[in-house]
Image: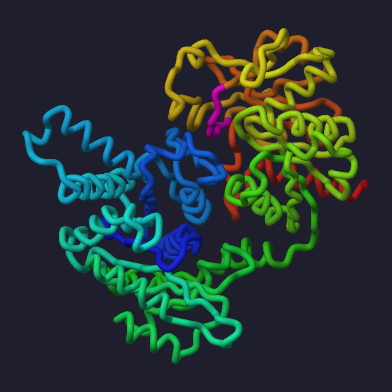
Amino acid sequence: MSKYIFITGGVISSLGKGIASASIGKILESRGLKVALMKLDPYINVDPGTMNPYQHGEVYVTEDGAETDLDLGHYERFTSTFSSKFNNITTGQIYNSVISKERKGDYLGKTIQVIPHITDAIKERIRKCAEVSKADIVIVEIGGTVGDIESLPFLEASRQFRLDMGYDNVFYIHLTLVPYIKAAGEVKTKPTQHSVGTLREIGVIPDVLICRTEESLTDNVKEKISLFCNVRKEAVIESPDMSSIYQVPLVFKKQILDEIILSHFKLICKSSDLNDWEKNVVNRVLNPKHKVTIAVVGKYIELQDAYKSIYEALIHAGIYNDARVEIKRIDSESLEDTKIDQAFEGVSGVLVPGGFGYRGIEGKIKAIKFSRLNKVPFLGICLGMQCAVIEFARNACNLKTANSTEFKLTKYPVISLLEEQGKLKDMGGTMRLGAYPCKIKKNSLADQVYGKNLIYERHRHRYEFNNKFKKLFEKNGMLLSGVCPGRDLIEIVELKGHPYFIAVQFHPEFKSKPDKAHPLFSGFINAALQFETVA
């Protein structure tokens, strides 16, 4: 039978529950256990697919095509688990499910209430995740902050879970803030006391407290937290600010968090030391031999989380190439009125990520033209690939009004909707989503990078390369090196005679890990290092 860990957050948001959950998954997986991680999101949207990146951050896409919370990216990067639609649930999904059953008459005329019907539906989804994953331990992260009205049904369901499954099979971890007051020169435990008090009022009594802090916690402070929060002193785990998120599993391991959890579950597992993780990931990310600057040209650049997986994949590629990747964030809208050479001064590679809508598109096209003409290594992803196609059509194929039908009606629609996409009315969950096959042409850059001719990558898009222009593009020097078999959809384009110019319709960043960089990113950073040497 699976064991369950529920992770809640208190005091303020953005404390890093996702990183903490992934790190706990990492240290437990290192002990030989199979783990599954899931996120419970309190918003009423069915999924984040139609939400603005400024409000939610990136949308993480699973192999089976679910549009999910970005924390699932952390789960997959830190562990060997593969997430699916069962690993992320929202209030919207739960209420939609319960209301649909009520309309069908499944409740036999009963009055439908939050307790037990909503909480039963939540618990059913948690158990379904355990059943599908066959995990030894299911780690359940509850979104939001304790005290928020939106999270109450999830917290209540977690309380009931211990009653249903037995004390030894359920474990509660609360992530909280212990702020340092500089003027007073001391840390304050009162916010943590109040947060735990609120949690206990709901009926959830934490077994471990993870304390985010700028300053190390003294024994006296830990004893005070232990006394007032009714948690054993050794179960007060400090989580200081670190240079890299990939250090967090080592911090937890050092404080024997894995032993505390295994002791509660009465599990005896193999020992582990995370030496490989420390050597091959942490040491390389903290002490690289080289440095390279990459420009990320996006339209949501102000928000760090909007391109979270992109930034992490660049770090992974840096680890692989023993290099620190410094990211220069460039708002694509600003490029429309900027001298392009000044914007890319000191840059050794240009990456144009995905997105939706016309805003900032012309700036992305200018960045791609700069990379193409100046032989600067370039990687385009999703919309970045579509912009590369538009730029090439306009400036290499002399189709001056070429565009995507997403943005403008044109005589040269080099990017357009598939016929079946044109008939859709709903926005949510109707794109080409999840893993699709891609056949790679031999002797291409893509072939060199991947080292195989059939790959599977995750998609999230609606518009495609217009095959009517294939011959013209190939005639002018663009190689269409990746195709979705059976559907003849162009997945990869690249330029002949360029050191590294490749753009893909899919999202390779979703399959990159710190100890296994995605080949497109590692090849990109290697080319950028070579460009920097030449420059």
Placement of 142 over or under 193, stated as above or below: above
- Of the 4 image quadrants, the one containing the N terminus is bottom left
Picture coordinates of residue 99, whole percent (x, y):
22, 34
Picture coordinates of residue 72, whole percent (x, y):
46, 48
What residue do we see at 62% from left, 61% from top?
281
Tell me which colouring the rendered structure shows. rainbow
Picture coordinates of residue 218, whole percent (x, y):
49, 88
In depth, the one of 476 and 446 nearer the eye is 476
User: Residue 164 falls in which quadrant of the image?
Assistant: bottom left
User: Residue 9 falls in which quadrant of the image?
Assistant: bottom left
What residue do we see at 35% from left, 44% from top?
90
Quick check: is 461 in the magenta stretch?
A: yes
What residue do we see at 58% from left, 50% from top?
305
Placement of 185 over or under 421, stated as above or below: below
Give the residue at the far right of this rendering: 535
- Count of number-bearing discs: 0
Relative horizontal placement of residue 159, taking residue 212 as reference (left or right):
left
In depth, the one of 173 and 195 nearer the eye is 195
In depth, the one of 284 and 43 nearer the eye is 43
Relative horizontal placement of residue 177, taking residue 108 as reference (left or right):
right
Quick check: is 386 in the magenta stretch?
A: no
What secondary structure characterizes most of the magenta part?
strand
In depth, the one of 288 and 346 nearer the eye is 346
Placement of 7 over or under 68, stated as above or below: below
Magenta residues span: 455-462
What residue do we see at 77% from left, 48% from top?
294
Picture coordinates of residue 7, whole percent (x, y):
36, 62
User: Residue 207 falls in which quadrant of the image?
Assistant: bottom left
